[in-house]
Image: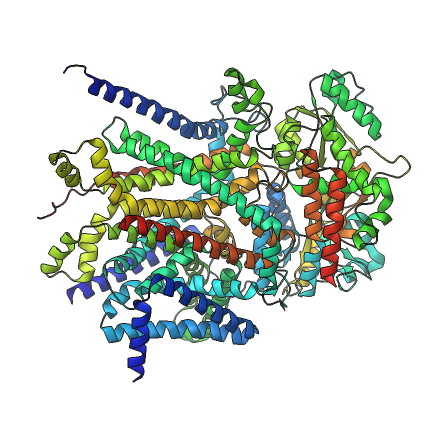
Amino acid sequence: MMNRLGIFKKTLSSLSLFLLSTVFMSGCGTQGAQRPQTAGKKIVVWHWMTDREEAFQELAKRYEAKTGIKVVFELYAPSDAYSQKVRAAAQARALPDIFGLLGEKRDFAAFIKAGHVANLTGAMEEQGGAWKNLLYEKALAVNEFRTDNPYGVEAGIYGVPIDVMNIQMVYNKKLFQKAGLDPARPPKDWAEFVADCQKLKEAGTQGLVSGWGEIWMIDCLASNFAFNIMGPDKVFATIRGEVPYTDPDWVKVFSLFKEMADRGMLASGIVTMVNKTAEQNFANERSAFAFNGSWCVNVYHGMNPSLDYGVMLPPKVNLKNPMYIWGGAGSSLLVNDRSAVKEEAVTFLKWLTATEQQAYLSETTRNLPSNRKVSGSIPEILADFSKGMDNVTHPNIWPVNELPKVIERFDKGIQSIIIGEKTPEGLAEELAKLKAEEMAKQK
Amino acid sequence: MIAEKIKQFYNLMHNATPKQKVIGTVLFLAALETFFLLFHDSAVFWVLAYGSVTLALLFLVLANLIKKSLSAFFFVVPALLIFSIFYIYPFFKVLQLSHHAWDGISPKMTFVGLSNFFEIMKDRIWWVSMGNAGYITLIALTFQNALALALALACDRQIRAKNFYRVIFFIPPVLSEVVVGLIWRWIYDGDYGFLNYTLGLLGLQHLAHNWLSDPNTALTCVAIIHSWKGFGWGFMILLAGLQTIPKELYEAAKVDGANVWQSFKNVTIPLMIPVFVLVMILTILGSMQAFVLILSMTGGGPGYHTEVPVTRILASMQGSSMFGYACAQGLTFGVILMMVSFAQMGISRKLKQA
Amino acid sequence: MRLNKYTAAQHASGFFINVFLIIVSVTCVFPLLWMFGSSLKTQSTIFSDMSVIPRAMHWGNFYLAWTKGGFGVYFLNSLFYTVVVVFGIVMVSSLAAYAFSRMNFPGKNLLFFMFLAAMMIPLPGSFVPLYVLVNNVRNVLLNTTAAATPFLLKVFPQSVVFGITSFIEDQFYPRTAYILCMINVGLSFSIYMLKTFFDRMPKELEDAARIDGCSRLGIWRHVALPLAKPAIAVIIIYNALNVWNEYILANLILSSKDLMPLQRGLMVFQGEHITQYPLLMAGMTITVVPILIIYLVMQRFIIKGITAGAVVG
């Protein structure tokens, strides 16, 4: 009996202790505890871009000063935690007013079909397409669904790009000089590339480094080569299943990697390097070439401000075709279709992509603006990156997309080729078989 | 009369032989599965799921009332409450999802019955990843636990700086994976790594190569890192176990004339067997589910050489948006882990009786 | 004392044991030292400067990490969550484990099996249903308070009512939800661990206490818990570490910045493209210190053997 009272007392005391501590905790918080809703409206933005948080906060302040609407930027990092949060929130119908989506086009389509994303075509086309023409076409294309898209989404523009990027090669000018190469003349085609790497090897420098532990990076370069060798149409035909992977052009793509591995043109350990490690490698001048995206400008600047490097397109294998690179919208923001402040959110995004704000963002965060009209005060190297925007393509704007299982086998297969476990022909056969199996399942 | 039947059923369950228990469990699971398959439709599924759980709980309370052991039952109630809300619901959800094809986003799921599980059986890469995890676990069971045991024994004796060592050995588990990944990547680096440097010093230059990119060594290297990070736990638990052996037993043994080895064999080992089992099961569970370090060290490569089940599940969830398939993978994985752990417990129980 | 073969062997084995211990210690300490040293470097020298402790020490990194990472509030939050969750787990799991070990009741084996199985079956994507559950309950809560507010307004002044509702919605509910989730995460392991140790306890002390007229709860409190101190210390360390390092659930369930734990501050330094290594290392050094302190304090309990009361007979 006494014990029961004792337990009761103890539970009560621990509960009250618990409650007291939460009160204490809330005192440390910044809750104003003023209900009901204040007169001013509020837009909540979720994002994952840690590097831009400060810039965003500053812009939020400016917007509030201008319009009286409070914009709350909430940062959730790292990117996979953010991705999970967005998907979980979608399930619970608890998405914020503005958010970004990290994922493939099919995820984007699924979000749209589930009613989470507002169709912005109307806003874009207003006043003769004023907003639309302000932004780079390639950046918009990533956020756009064409009329006959394979996802069954109503045609239109569903997102706003706030910066653009592309993925090219960079080369270390100082290491070039050390090896007796001309820093103003990076290799234009495959033969030159091989020769340059040979010279660099003799001078004791590694050739190409990239984050090929992350398989999408392999996919990117392989795709670039494929587009160059056989042209976009044939690649799409392969994805549709009309051309098998055993086609000689594809074997050629695979053999390029074999050649790089056999000739020792690749940095050691490249197949298990994550991109951040590859960036350290290039910043510390251990390799002469790097395959990386335009975000690297900010990264290299932090790690080695005195790094002297230039930008080049990946070397052409087929001299008759243009070289394609991946690029488009760097990060994009979407508007929640169920948001209570949809109108205000769209207006805010318009403001965010206006010239003045874009210039500010690009200066402070060293990213390429998505606004065409921003000029001047972009670092020179970044301007060099933007020159490649004409050659840009991206899986998100292709009419067809390869099945994820095939992509994974493709990329991992190239890793195996590099370490000498598979042959280009062997991989081609394996892929053709897998593709046939998967396509049969789809029926 | 019903009470009689319940009592009979209860006695049957309680007194079943292990073989009967296994058969009974399999039959029960099969019946459960059929039940759920037939009623995969949302509302009915949840009514059945929660209904059966509530019924089971009521049955337990009733049984306890009959046996007048309610006060004992209440000891378990807080844990049971929290568990049933935060585990049982996700469990049923995952069970439901594993029978559907779903991309994780759209409000609609497509029922596919058992085909996810059949896919898993045919998925060669899944079994490769299981094998890799098994290899890591093997290294952990031998290397890691031997190290932990050796260190625990060493620290159990009266040696200097005992407390100092106790703290030091717990540092690896406390360190974040980011730091561990960075350091070990530097150690294993092909050109500037510490390991190759040391090998060069020892005159074994020819052994130096790129440890993490070589398909032959990548998995072993990852396993070693994992063991290094984990031995601190085993050390701590084994030490706790050694320290709770009453000193009187050692003194009694000494009085009986036993030397170091004999007292070890007759006092330490028998009392430590349950702790050994605990550590082994925890090691198996921990090593099989390892993935964070692997993702940051090798990304699962080169090729599929360092893929483990959890990285495959992540790939299904995020890479190919096959959420239902990922759930099926998780459940299969869990069931296999369970069988291994219980087999382990059974073996050790037999050893104890021997 | 003559130097005979026995003592020489003892000395030699003692020597080798010490060498062995030292080598292992070095491998354990080195990463910690490196982390600390890196926090004193700059972004550009962190991977090029090979020294463990740099010549030019940027102590300012610690201050920057604290302010930029918003560590002030996060630190308190982490402390709060860790203390409450650990306390909760110790209470709940020791009660359950004691019952599983020392009492007999219908369903005992089944329930224990269930807890064990839960430990073994990882639920991928279980976070999503949890989040949905938490959110649904939150919506119910919001609706209830919204419905109750008009009535409460008639009785209490506005500021009090709104103060209470916002406290419940923004502070009490999310924190409680997170705490309960975290308790659940550590439950299976703790129960299994404690049951193993309770099983090994000598029964005589309990019998003595029962003869003295102690109730079951009293035995639990006065006999079992003190005897199992080493095991409880292990549970405390394990769960404290888990809660302290956790961020996935925190990210999902907690939405406002002032509820977030320490890991959130660290994540800020790991951007999508840029990782601010010196600040990250400084932040991690700050994060590691409390856990080491908890371990230092708890591990003393692991070494205390059974000193109280000799075994009778």
Identified at 76% across, 64% down, the residue is A152
Identified at 23% across, 68% down, the residue is B71
Q: Does C218 sit left or right of C12 as displayed?
A: left
The percent coordinates of residue A120 (x first, y second) are 75, 60
- Out of A53 and B74, give the one closest to the viewer: B74
- Out of A383 and B258, give the one closest to the viewer: B258
**B49 is higher (above) or lower (below) than B314:** below
The percent coordinates of residue B49 (x first, y second) are 47, 72
When asked about the image quadrant of residue B70, the answer is bottom left
Residue A145 seen in the current view:
yes
**B284 is higher (above) or lower (below) than A17:** above
> In the rendered picture of this protein, how many numbered marks are placed on residues?
0
Q: Could you tell me which quadrant the N terminus of chain A lies in?
A: bottom left
Q: Could you tell me which quadrant the C terminus of chain A lies in?
A: bottom right
Identified at 51% across, 58% down, the residue is B331
Q: Does A384 sit left or right of B110 as displayed?
A: right
**C292 is higher (above) or lower (below) than A20:** above
- Out of B293 and B354, give the one closest to the viewer: B354
Q: Residue furthest right?
A: A320
Residue A35 seen in the current view:
no
- Out of B175 and B289, give the one closest to the viewer: B289
The percent coordinates of residue A343 (x first, y second) are 69, 62
Which coloring applies here? rainbow
The percent coordinates of residue B100 (x first, y second) are 60, 65
Identified at 79% across, 55% down, the residue is A400
